[in-house]
Amino acid sequence: MGRYILKRVGYMIVTFYVVVTLTFLSMKMLPGTPFKFANRLTPEQLNQLKHYYGLDQPVPIQYLHYLWNFIHGDLGGSFQYGMQPVTEFLFQRFPVSLQLGFESMVFGTVLGILLGIVSGINRGRVLDWGTVVLTVVFISIPSFIFAAILQYFFSVQIRIFPVIGWSGPMTHVLPVISIGVGVMATVARFMRTEMVEVLNQDYIVTAQAKGLSTSAVIYKHAIRNAMIPIVTVIGPLTSAVVTGSLVIENIFAIPGIGSQFVDAIVTNDYPMIMGTTELYAGLFIGTILIVDILYGIIDPRIRVSGGKPS
């Protein structure tokens, strides 16, 4: 097991290094400058600013300098906010994005599992078809469109929930639903597929033949076995929800990393863009690593075959 984990960690480190490198090189290809009112500066003033921030050095030198600082936990200073350390912004704003993602995942996962179970048990019936249609609709509609619809009806027309903000439980409802319905639809479809497959297994037929009640077969055998593969989809979904809340945070004026990331892109704030991208990449890669380790614990065949069930 230890060798398996070390191997997976090695893969993740290499992957993260590639992400850091590609992110740095991408910043060098962006048009424009990160300086405010650059069009009002003389060429001499612009060159002085580039020299001050080290942007006039050759790209390989800048890259090595950035890697050295990154290894020591220094992501640079934000051009947009007077060289205030990027790490301070991330530490201040990340808890809000994490809370939004966690609440959305809990909401979407719980409802998705329940809908998937109901749909799988009632395969081919009205409840099954209704659930399938519902999940297709929620997967097809982008979260920001759904957020706008929720804002219009529940904030503007009915005035139950605030239009924007993140200051109390009532301000959490619409953003969480906007993100959570996509999670719910994905988990429900996956859970339905697993339930249908498990209910057709021989051991389920044997349990029923032995006289076990339908409820006992479903809750003690079918659901437990159908839940195991859900780890595969919940892992990447968790990181995708946290990283995919960029537009939702802007729509609802939530002070998380997402809104800051959008502002950084608009102003060409290179250190902020790179730091946020690397944080998101680290979350995604770390989640995949955890899923791989959990799968290795659940199914020893994966450890033996190097990552694929035999």
Image: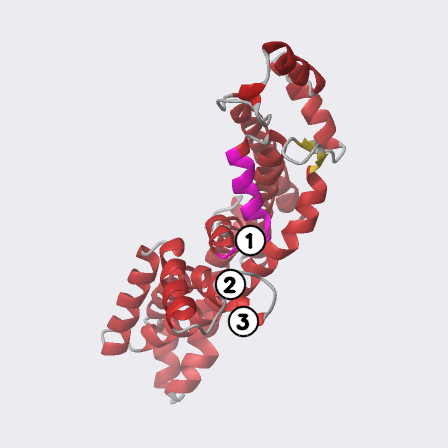
Q: Which residue is mark 1?
A: 291
Q: Which residue is mark 2?
A: 104
Q: Which residue is mark 3?
A: 170
Does the stretch in magenta take in 30?
Answer: no
Residue 173: x %, y % from top left: 50, 68
**Position of 55 compared to 26: left or right?**
right
Q: Is residue 61 above or below residue 251?
A: above
Residue 202: x %, y % from top left: 35, 72
**Chain-order first, disc 3 or disc 2:** 2
Name the mark nearer the viewer: 3 or 1.
3
Q: Residue at x 54, y 26 (%)?
A: 27
SS for callout 3: helix
Specify the segment rendered in magenta: 252-266
**Position of 124 compared to 98: left or right?**
left
Q: State how far apart marks 3 and 1 are (Cα).
A: 33 Å
Name the mark nearer the viewer: 1 or 2.
2
